[in-house]
Amino acid sequence: MAVLPIAKMGNPILLQKAAPVEDPTAPEIRRLAADMQDTIEDIGASGLAAPQVFVSKRVVVYRIIAARIPPGSGLQPRPWTVMVNPVITPKTELQTPVWERCLSVPGLHGKVPRFMNISIRYTDLEGKTHTHDATSSWAALLQHECDHLDGIVYPM
């Protein structure tokens, strides 16, 4: 596969709402997801949205490795996950400021209000629909990546 270049803040693709994926099982979506995984692995990041690699499609790839889990959070590592056309539903109205950084905004950190308890629904590369809850920094990660699909970069 390939390591893809990352769009930096100011690039117009990061401000566009990404297009829904019509066929999550299409070979080009599988290739995109594999390349996004290679890119995350190369950079040492946790997640990536397709617009960040210059593809305006609603695709997110992420993983949570043990070394990145905050102590005392109760979170478990998460394997590589590809989410096509994800939709987040907050499970509470309460938001908590969370420190974030972004591959598209190198060298900066900022506090962003995030829901700490969400439900997420998405389709995988086999065309199966999944729905599950996410909490804490896992919920924040998913919201951050899904923001990219709506043309939102965290400093905004």
Image (cartoon, rainbow, N blue to C red):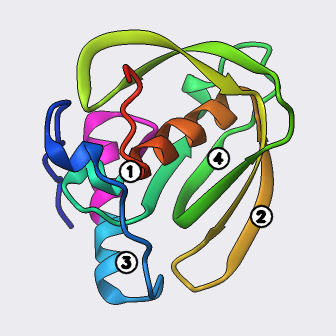
Going by the image, does 64 lie left or right of 120? left
Q: Which residue is mark 2?
A: 131
Spatial CA span between label 3 and label 1: 14 Å
Spatial CA span between label 1 and label 2: 19 Å
Element at badge 3?
Answer: helix
Q: Which residue is mark 1?
A: 49
Residue 155 x, y percent position in the rendering? 37, 19
Which quadrant would residue 77 be assigned to in this image? Answer: top right
**As drawn, 122 above or below 70:** below
Ranked by sequence position, the earlier of labels 3 and 2 is 3
Asked if disc 3 and disc 1 are in contact, CB closer than 8 Å, the reply is no
Q: Which residue is mark 4?
A: 78
Task: Name the residue rendered at 51%, 63% in the picture.
Answer: 82
- Mark 4 or mark 3: which is in front? 3
Q: Residue flagged by tag 1: what amino acid is it?
A: Ala
Q: Residue flagged by tag 4: what amino acid is it?
A: Arg
